[in-house]
Image: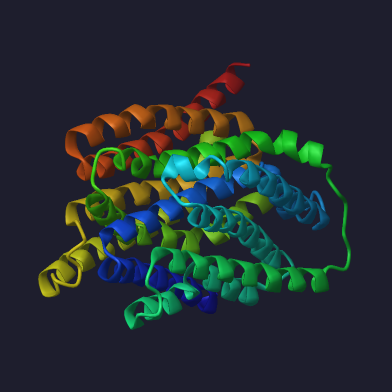
């Protein structure tokens, strides 16, 4: 447990340093490009999943099927992702202003990010948690440390070089994880059909995609209104505050989500809103994220006073506001995990769709008025609405069931 937490923390430190290395060596415009690449990889990797892996992992955790199901699901999803990427290759360069080489790197990165994440999850499933944590460290932040040294040493001179190192690491992690899973596999267990997984997993898939879009929409909208320099400053501040959600996920969510799946059939008479919004993991996530938020904001303020030249790209008001948003998102992670564990597909879909729909005018309006500060304020509003929607829809469902 301690080793896994240290590795997760080390990965976050690596990514944190990489943002500062890119901004100091390549400039804030390059930081903006890297930030957009991160956003695209997160959103696109959700799309690549097709929902089958989400439902497959839920069934494995609940003991409803064997490990063969997620292995098959990941292979099918990766094949579809490659086909979609081949089609997107012809439109992506013109849509994002990229050349063919950069577009190829970005598309390959998106696919490798999804596949490496899913295959590495299977390493945990075959009871190799320390190795899984080490591979997760390598793909999330371990590669960032050599990238920082390369940037500061003059060996990496462009953002394409940074992305290529990220891609190479994902490929290596996928290869190692695949070998480990193949050797550990003894009994395939009961299979679930891909058709069944697609049907059952689609609401969660659509929900995950919409939640990711609503969480990263601020970057895509903000890019239309501000310069690349301002965009880079916002991404740097956003990434600093993101430590709150990332560490809360490592400390609470990775334990909470499997626990919710294992105990999904416990206390069947308990109202849904209490099971999803009032469980002990929600409280732990809120307290943990709140403490981390205070620590991050205090550290940022001290750094601005002590070493202003080293952190000149940071915007303290943006860090403070987006930090509040990440506290709410940490709580929302547990709530959505509860909805998935208990199989409430419609509620997950409804709350995610409503959150995405309201996020578009919210971000657009606030960014038009206040620029980067408006984007941070919009992130707070969208995150709070997302949490409130899950609670209200769950309460309404409870009242409907009681009336019925």
Q: Quadrant of residue 154?
A: bottom left
Please indicate, yes or no, whether residue 279 appears anywhere in the rendered image: no
Q: Nearer the viewer, residue 121 or 388?
A: 121
The structure residue drawn at horizontal position 55% and vertical position 25%, both measured from the top left corner, is: 397
Residue 230 point in image, percent of width and height = 22, 51
336 sits to left or right of 312: right
Visible residue check, residue 340: yes
Q: Quadrant of the N terminus?
A: bottom right
Residue at image position (33%, 47%) is 325
Question: Residue 374 or 27: which is nearer the viewer?
Answer: 27
The coloring applied to the image is rainbow
312 vs 43, left or right, is left
Closer to the camera, 115 or 8? 115
Q: Nearer the viewer, residue 53 or 220?
A: 220
* Residue 381 in which image quadrant: top left
Q: Residue at x 23, y 47 (%)?
A: 227
Question: Which quadrant, please, contains the C terminus?
Answer: top right
Total tally of numbered discs in the picture: 0
Q: Residue furthest top?
A: 404
Q: Residue furthest left?
A: 305
Q: Position of residue 323 (x, y in %)?
A: 30, 53
The part of the image, by quadrant, that contains residue 126 is bottom right
List x then y, in percent, for residue 341: 64, 45
Q: Measured from the top left, where is residue 202 in percent x and y? A: 66, 35
Q: Residue at x 58, y 40 (%)?
A: 339
């Amino acid at each position: 447990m301690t080793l896994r937490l240290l590795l997760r923390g080390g990965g976050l430190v690596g990514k944190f340093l990489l943002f500062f290395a890119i901004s100091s060596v390549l400039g804030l415009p390059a930081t903006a490009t890297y930030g957009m690449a991160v956003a695209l990889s997160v959103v696109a990797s959700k799309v690549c999943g097709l929902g089958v892996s989400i439902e497959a992992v839920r069934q494995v955790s609940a003991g409803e099927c064997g490990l063969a199901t997620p292995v098959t699901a990941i292979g099918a999803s990766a094949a579809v992702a490659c086909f979609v990427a081949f089609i997107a290759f012809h439109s992506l360069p013109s849509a994002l202003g990229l050349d063919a080489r950069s577009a190829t790197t970005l598309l390959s990165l998106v696919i490798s990010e999804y596949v490496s994440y899913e295959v590495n999850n299977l390493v945990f499933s075959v009871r190799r948690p320390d190795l899984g944590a080490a591979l997760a460290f390598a793909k999330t932040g371990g590669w960032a440390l050599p990238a920082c040294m390369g940037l500061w040493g003059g060996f990496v001179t462009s953002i394409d070089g940074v992305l290529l190192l990220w891609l190479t690491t994902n490929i290596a992690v996928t290869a190692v994880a695949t070998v480990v899973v193949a050797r550990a596999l003894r009994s395939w267990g009961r299979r679930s059909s891909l058709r069944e997984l697609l049907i059952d997993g689609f609401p969660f898939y659509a929900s995950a995609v919409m939640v990711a879009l609503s969480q990263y929409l601020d970057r895509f909208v903000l890019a239309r209104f501000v310069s690349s320099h301002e965009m880079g400053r916002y991404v740097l501040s956003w990434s600093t505050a993101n430590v709150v959600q990332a560490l809360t996920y490592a400390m609470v969510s990775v334990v909470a989500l499997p626990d919710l799946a294992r105990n999904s059939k416990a206390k069947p008479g308990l109202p849904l809103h209490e099971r999803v919004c009032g469980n002990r993991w929600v409280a732990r996530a809120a307290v943990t994220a709140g403490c981390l938020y205070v620590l991050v904001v205090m550290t940022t303020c001290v750094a601005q006073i002590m070493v202003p030249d080293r952190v000149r790209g940071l915007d303290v008001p943006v860090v403070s506001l987006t930090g509040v948003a990440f506290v709410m998102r940490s709580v929302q992670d547990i709530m959505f995990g509860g909805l998935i564990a208990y199989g409430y597909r419609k509620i997950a879909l409804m709350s995610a769709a409503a959150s995405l729909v309201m996020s578009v005018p919210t971000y657009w309006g606030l960014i038009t008025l206040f620029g980067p500060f408006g984007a941070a304020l919009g992130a707070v509003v969208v995150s709070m609405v997302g949490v409130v929607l899950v609670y209200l829809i769950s309460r309404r469902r409870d009242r409907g069931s009681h009336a019925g």
